[in-house]
Image (cartoon, rainbow, N blue to C red):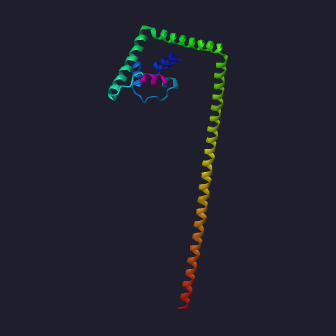
Amino acid sequence: MNAEIIQRLESSFPGGWDGLEAWILDPYNTDNLSDDERRLVSNIRYLSGFPPDKLAKEESWHQIALAAIGEIRRLREMGLLTSLLEREEVLRRQREKDRAEWLAQRPEQEAAIKQDKAEQEIWQNRINEIRAETKALHKKLEAAREKLRLASLKERARNMEIDRDMLSETVKALEMSNDLDEDDA
């Protein structure tokens, strides 16, 4: 996995290792990265340590990041990077094999782990269902709000029409009253 990540990081920067170095030194540049790549970057940053002085921390972090990049360059130039990554992959497979054998010797623990994974999957599915239902409810709520806004606007327009009609009748009544007063005079 790390071999693939390093190869992807190496090939995804037009400036080669200089581009990779600039990317690692920018702590906020994690856009368009997979979770594994983010984890690798955070591990590089974590390895810088946590000195009390922020300036020292920044300098220390930069030095460690640059040293790591320099070491990767050196290993690559010597042709050892590929063999190192292959060895890491062999060790990872061996750990998985050893774990499988250890679990095979302990069936109750293997069963407990499988049960935990099954339960996790059930709960994850339930969470996904709840998210989908919540999303649908939000859409319905927004539609209901739009209908309520429309009904409110219609009611407001009706009330304004009634007010206009009443005002028109009042004006007509006053005009008729003025006409009658003029006739009497």
- Relative horizontal placement of residue 4, taking residue 47 as reference (left or right): right
Q: Quadrant of residue 74?
A: top left
Q: Quadrant of residue 80?
A: top left
Residue at x 62%, y 58% (from the top left corner): 151
Q: Extreme bottom residue here? A: 185
Residue at x 35%, y 22% (from the top left corner): 60
Taking the magenta stretch, the answer to whether it contains residue 43 is yes
Above or below, comparing residue 90 to residue 145 in the picture: above
- Relative horizontal placement of residue 27, taking residue 103 as reference (left or right): left
Q: Position of residue 13 (x, y in %)?
A: 44, 22
Above or below, comparing residue 82 to residue 128 in the picture: above
Taking the magenta stretch, the answer to whether it contains residue 81 is no
Residue at x 46%, y 11% (from the top left corner): 81
Q: How many marks?
A: 0
Residue at x 55%, y 80% (from the top left corner): 174
Q: Position of residue 58 (x, y in %)?
A: 35, 26
Q: Main secondary structure of the magenta part?
A: helix
Q: Position of residue 161 (x, y in %)?
A: 59, 67
Q: Position of residue 111 (x, y in %)?
A: 67, 20
Q: What is the magenta range? A: 39-46
Q: Quadrant of residue 127?
A: top right
- Relative horizontal placement of residue 133, taking residue 82 as reference (left or right): right
